[in-house]
Image (spheres, rainbow, N blue to C red):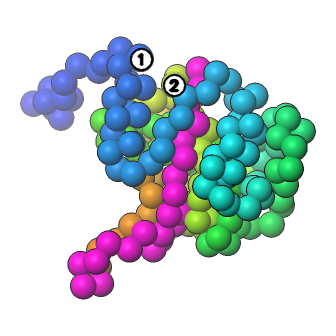
Amino acid sequence: MTRDAHRAPAPAVNDLSSLFAAKASAEGAQVEAIASPQDVPAAIASALDGANAPPRLHLPVNSPLRALPWDGAPGLAVLDAAPGADDAALAAADYAIAETGTLVFFAARERPASWHFLPGREFVLLSRAQILPALEDVLALALAQGMPSTLNLVTGPSRTGDIEQTMEMGAHGPRHLHILLCD
């Protein structure tokens, strides 16, 4: 009997996004629905303002996300340099896993893998169409497309309880994860 024989049938796309949002929220991520990628700059500016965080966002210089209408978020500075622990950064997820609320990032020149470990606050753009039922679905697509050199799986903000079983946020990545979910 194959592993697939033990899996529940895949839910519908709307159910996938609802399941993903519920799982991601339960893991400590903030999930915000936006109408389109064009709303990303304003959503980020509003979130940073609401968190009393500096209005600065780090974005790789060759990222396609630089084409978004950043002039629609006056006062928000978009910086080229790699982010630090007190900074915010933006990435686009390649896929997400509904079953666990996990974001999936394939490393590429315009999407450095290291950027998921550096900022204290990470914003992630995710399309509902990129949400898949399970890890096996993501791996099948990755193999079909040519496995990337690095595949990062991010489930909620970074945390560890290794030292005296005290929860430490931001130990291996962002302390805050803000997912911008669009159609």
Is label 2 in a helix, a strand or a loop? helix
**Residue visible at 68% across and 24% down?**
36
Amino acid bearing label 2? Arg
Position of residue 73 measured from the top left corner of the image (x, y, whole percent): 82, 40
Magenta span contains residue 170: yes
Q: Gap in Å between the C-alphas at discs 1 and 2?
A: 8 Å
- Residue situated in front as seen by the camera: 167 or 16: 167
Q: Please state which amino acid type lies under the numbered disc 1.
A: Val
Q: Is residue 41 left or right of residue 86?
A: right
The segment highlighted magenta reads 163-183
In this rendering, would 95 be left or right of 90?
left
Magenta span has 128? no
Q: Is residue 182 left or right of residue 31?
A: right
- The vertical placement of 172 against 1, above or below, is below
Q: Let me know if residue 139 appears in the view.
A: yes
Name which residue lies at 61% across and 27% down.
Answer: 34
Quarter of the image with the C terminus is top right
Q: In the image, is residue 32 above or below residue 30? A: above
The residue that label 1 is drawn on is: 13
Residue occupying the point 35% across, 19% down = 15
Q: Using the image, tell me which numbered label, if any, was put on residue 128.
A: 2
